[in-house]
Amino acid sequence: MLYPELFKQLEAVRWDMEKDIPWATFDASQLSDEQAQTIKMNAITEWAALPATEMFLRDNRGDSDFSAFMSIWFFEEQKHSLVLMEYLRRFRPDLVPSEQELHDIRFEFDPAPALETLMLHFCGEIRLNHWYRRAAEWHTEPVIKHIYQTLSQDEARHGGAYLRYMKRAIGQFGDEARAAFAKVGVLMASARRTAQALHPTNLHVNKALFPRDTIQSRLPNPEWLEQWLDSQIRFDAVWETKVVDRILHNMSLLMERSFQSVQELNRFRKEMTLRVAPPTAAA
């Protein structure tokens, strides 16, 4: 089992909301209303760990190891929402999300293949790590800069934990897992070709609720994410390239094959897809 070891590793570096956040260094002159509004949107978005955990537990009933790990991931992700709300409670109480605003993003996700979902969230952790690093640079107020730096480090550790489960899956399922991971990897590394940000909170997950079946579509300001990325933290081509490079690097380690471009990963995807296709389909 991976859960006991991951518990020890993540427990050893867990930060304390009261002791490790420098609340006393708050500088009101460095927090604009525009910046405070984005903190509220991120606080609500982080609350999406609740429906995501419900999805993970439902779709991984046969995997108690990974389901147990969800206790760590869920705790730390909800803590992200909580620390952002605590920041607002202390310094902009008028912007603290209401319980209804938080509850609005809790809805059921359609069942999906567990391997693809695992890879999707692995890539999501990489992307969020980079988004929060950029947010820490954009913000001018010292406390929120520190918070975003802290959250970005958590997301990187979560990505590392997901990678451990992906390695285990390859050992268990072989080419089936390779095909699933490569398929989603190609999608998530191709954000420059899409009109929307490729992150789990911005993908459609419930056909019956379409088009209000993404986390972002249920926020008080559904257009917030694109504005935050494009006009505020300015997550440009340079930063997007960093995300793609990290995905390709980790896929290279995972598959024990070098991928220098999305095109190379896509060729590998096609190769794996043929390997796992039924004989009649392959013919």
Image (cartoon, rainbow, N blue to C red):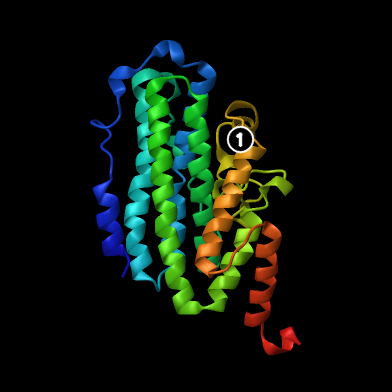
Q: Which residue is mark 1?
A: 235
Residue 201, image x and y in percent? 55, 46
| Residue 53 appears in view | no
Q: Residue at x 59, y 31 (%)?
A: 228
Q: Residue at x 69, y 72 (%)?
A: 270
Residue 9 horizontal side relative to residue 165, left or right? left
Q: Residue at x 60, y 32 (%)?
A: 224
Return the residue found at the far top.
29
Where's the N terminus, which quadrant? bottom left
Q: Residue at x 38, y 29 (%)?
A: 146
Where's the C terminus, which quadrant? bottom right
Q: Quadrant of residue 120?
A: bottom right
Residue 24, image x and y in percent? 28, 19
237 or 43: which is nearer to us? Answer: 237
Relative to 25, residue 264 above or below: below
244 or 116: which is nearer to us? Answer: 244
Q: Amino acid at mark 1?
A: Phe
Which type of secondary structure does the marked residue at label 1 adopt? Answer: loop
Residue 161 horizontal side relative to residue 205, left or right? left
Residue 113, image x and y in percent? 55, 68
